[in-house]
Image (spheres, grey):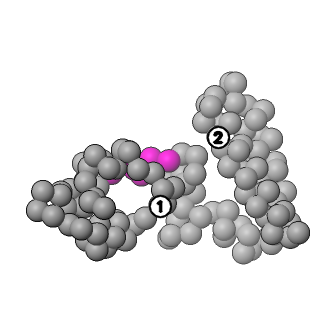
Amino acid sequence: MACDAEDKGEIDFGLRLTVEDAYALCHAASHTDNTPDIREVVEKYGEDAKADPVNRPAHYTSGGIECIDAMQAAFGDEAVKDFCLCNAFKYLWRHRQKNGVEDLKKARWYLNRLITAMEAEE
């Protein structure tokens, strides 16, 4: 699999990689002379790749840890499940007045996290 700029827009495996990890993966793949270096691709398209206000908002990550993961470590599973339910409610409540579909996606994210936590208990 070549790691070129055209693939960037067509293949989405749902992964979030650091630049170093992406570089290592691309370097390990069949890297030919006509394939741009991953650093060039990240520099050119990096802003689009970083901007993910639903699944990984930059303002909720500090020092490589997501805020919700720190909350889980500090307050426990039940508190985070309640937090997810309340946040899903908040985003559903305000979606028409604020961010529309983006807020609906955020509500879905919190519901998915809650469902995953509840299924893990079963």
Badge 1 is on which residue?
Answer: 16
**Please, what is the dominant secondary structure of the magenta stretch?**
helix
Q: The disc labelled 2 sits on which kind of residue?
A: Lys
Query: Is 6 positioned to the left or the right of 87 in the image?
Result: left
Query: Is 35 positioned to the left or the right of 8 in the image?
Result: left
Residue 85 position, x and y percent, is 82, 50
At horizontal 52% and vertical 65% (from top left) the residue drawn is: 62
At horizontal 28% and vertical 46% (from top left) the residue drawn is: 6
Spot the residue most to the right: 122
Question: Circle 1: is it few (<14), some (14-19), or many (20+) Cα within 10 Å?
Answer: few
Which type of secondary structure does the marked residue at label 2 adopt?
Answer: helix
Residue nearest the viewer, comparing 51 with 120 = 120
At horizontal 49% and vertical 60% (from top left) the residue drawn is: 15
Spot the residue most to the top: 97
> Over which residues does the magenta segment extend?
46-52
- Placement of the N terminus among the 4 image quadrants: bottom left
- Tell me, yes or no, whether the highlighted magenta stretch contains residue 53: no
Which type of secondary structure does the marked residue at label 1 adopt?
Answer: loop
At horizontal 60% and vertical 36% (from top left) the residue drawn is: 102
Q: CA distance from mark 1 to mark 2?
A: 18 Å
Q: The disc labelled 1 sits on which kind of residue?
A: Arg
